[in-house]
Amino acid sequence: MAAYEKKTTAGQHNGLPAPVQAPQPAATYPRTRLRRTRSSEWLRDICAENRLSTDDLIYPLFITEGTNVNQPVASMPGISRQSIDLTLEDIKASLDLGIKAFALFPVVAPEKKSPNGEESYNPDNLICQALQTIKRAVPDAGLIADVALDPYTTHGHDGLLENGEILNEETVEILCRQALIQAQAGADVIAPSDMMDGRIAQIRDTLETRGCKNTLILSYAAKYASAFYGPFRDAVGSGDILQGDKKTYQMNPANSDEALREVALDIAEGADMIMVKPGMPYLDIIRRVKDRFALPTFAYQVSGEYAMLHAAAQNGWLNYESCMLESLLAFKRAGCDAILTYAAKDAARTLS
Ligand code: PBG
């Protein structure tokens, strides 16, 4: 056997036997002209490998206290912090556009924040009120509730902070309480975005034993310590107060194998669906996760990605609509089943 024929584990594909491939005849020009299938719109359409639909969109919403409140977020054109009543209107309008799922984030009043984030497990807190109101009014809307302490802590971290360290087990205990009250308030999906070790198992057990066995878990399994979250932190008011960074719990952007280990653990612990975050800079991670685990895989096109599209468009440098749609299609091509995006309504309007 010649060196170039060397049989290694190359026959292995993600630890599984390689799929059986039909022999590929060599395609040669000019009999093969790939431009033929691109030559008209109907051909491009029938040959399209991937498609974006409103079924793929999850719309994130920022909820604030009060009634009839709408505060635009400066760094996220078209996005506002809205009180529950206006959020409900927004959700109804989005349902009419074909969007089916919504991710809710609270803007917690500064006086309700504390070092240990106790407000996160107050069953009467803003997010629980929102979940109850929305679930009652539009029971068919899919409601996804974030689990993490950063909206509630005075230091802006996703967990408890002691002597400069984020405590793991102590944080997970609080996350379980937070998950439970949100599930009881009407969340269909609990989405831990905190990156503590072992939290999926504990949250799953809590939901299982406390009457919420049908509540799903969407794990932010591969969440990176990214600089693209800036506008989100402005929106929820955790940016200015954040002490230090989140690098001891969110992933190092240098790593890819580690993302597979995170996902494997979370699946073993009971996650139903997996999130990769941010989105476009991490399309390679989405592809690896989907190929390896073949479970519902979502991406979060985060605030900074959305802000970049708008900033370039406002300067007349890019066309917002085409770049936005192209970026969302790229997620589908990378293997995503759905995409959390602030552009959900813009995309749905174009698609419908
Ligand atoms: C924190 C959380 C963050 C985002 C969603 N949940 C920011 C962070 O980790 O600091 C960012 C989303 C976005 O940028 O759109 N639990």
Image (spheres, rainbow, N blue to C red):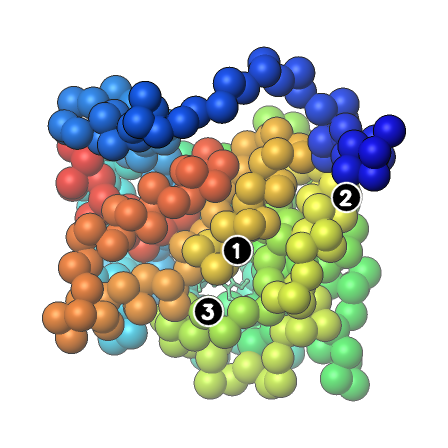
In the image shown, does 302 or 209 lie closer to the viewer? 302
What percent of the width, then of the height, locates residue 267? Answer: 71, 37
In the image shown, does 325 or 99 lie closer to the viewer? 325
What percent of the width, then of the height, locates residue 222? Answer: 62, 53
Task: Answer with the quarter of the image where residue 286 lies.
Answer: top right
Please say whether residue 190 is visible from this viewpoint.
no
Of the two numbered discs 1 and 3 on the same chain, state the one appearing first in sequence: 3
Is ligand 1 closer than 8 angstroms to the Cβ of mark 2?
no
Please, what secondary structure does the residue beneath circle 2 have? helix
- Which residue lies under the disc numbered 1? 282
Q: Is residue 310 left or right of residue 240?
A: left
Give amino acid for label 1. Answer: Tyr
How many residues crowd mark 2 within 10 Å: few (<14), some (14–19), many (20+)? some
What percent of the width, then of the height, locates residue 135? Answer: 38, 36
> Considering only vertical position in the picture, is 82 above or below 225?
above
- Which residue lies under the disc numbered 2? 265
Give amino acid for label 3. Answer: Tyr
Separation of residues labelled 2 and 1 (CA atoms): 20 Å
In the image shown, does 286 or 98 lie closer to the viewer? 286
- Which residue lies under the disc numbered 3? 229
Is ligand 1 closer than 8 angstroms to the Cβ of mark 3?
yes
Q: Disc 2 or disc 1, which is closer to the eye?
A: 1
